Image (tube, rainbow, N blue to C red):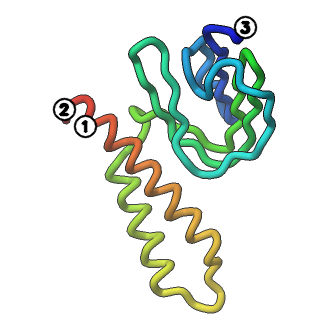
Amino acid sequence: MPPETLRLDVVTPERHLVAESVDEVILPGHAPLLTDLDIGPLVYRRGQERRELAVAGGFVEVLPDRVTVLAEVAEAPEEIDVARAEQAKERAEQRLKSATPDTDYERAQQAMRKALLRAEVGKARHHREGS
């Protein structure tokens, strides 16, 4: 019988961002898995409370009773400066538009994806709070 909750740990090189028992990240009882992380949101739920983090790079290990995320970068919505994320998106767009032969196109695309993610996660928090 699968466990009713999962232990979720989200760790970056700088800090331990999340360490709690949650109801859903990937459904409890999921088959064991070890994989790398891309740039994207990490959504988890405890009771009726739904939380979202912006994560980029690293690894995730899924076991039947716990999920461990070792992320290069992870940010909670309340930590994200949406205006700053929008500025980073604009800088990345400019880099991509004015690409020269020495432009690191892949790095510029990753910067764009990170900025878009941060803005999206930060804006979602403001929307939920009615700001």
Label 1 neighbourhood size at 10 Å, few (<14), some (14-19), many (20+)? few
The residue to which callout 3 is attached is: 1
Residue 48 coordinates in the image, percent (x, y): 39, 15
The residue to which callout 2 is attached is: 130
Q: Amino acid at mark 3?
A: Met
**Callout 1 secondary element:** helix
Residue farthest along the front direction in this orientation: 1
Mark whose residue sits in front, 2 or 3: 3
Q: Amino acid at mark 2?
A: Gly
Residue farthest along the bottom direction in this orientation: 101
In this rendering, the answer to whether 28 lies above or below 122 is: above
The reply to whether discs 1 and 2 touch (Cβ–Cβ < 8 Å) is yes
CA–CA distance between discs 1 and 2? 5 Å
Determine the residue positioned at 37% across, 42% down.
Answer: 122
**Callout 2 secondary element:** loop
Circle number at residue 31: none
The reply to whether discs 2 and 3 touch (Cβ–Cβ < 8 Å) is no
In this rendering, the answer to whether 83 lies above or below 95 is: above
Upstream in sequence: badge 2 or badge 3: 3
The residue to which callout 1 is attached is: 127
CA–CA distance between discs 2 and 3? 41 Å
Determine the residue positioned at 32% across, 52% down.
Answer: 83
Drawn side of residue 113 relative to residue 72, left or right:
left
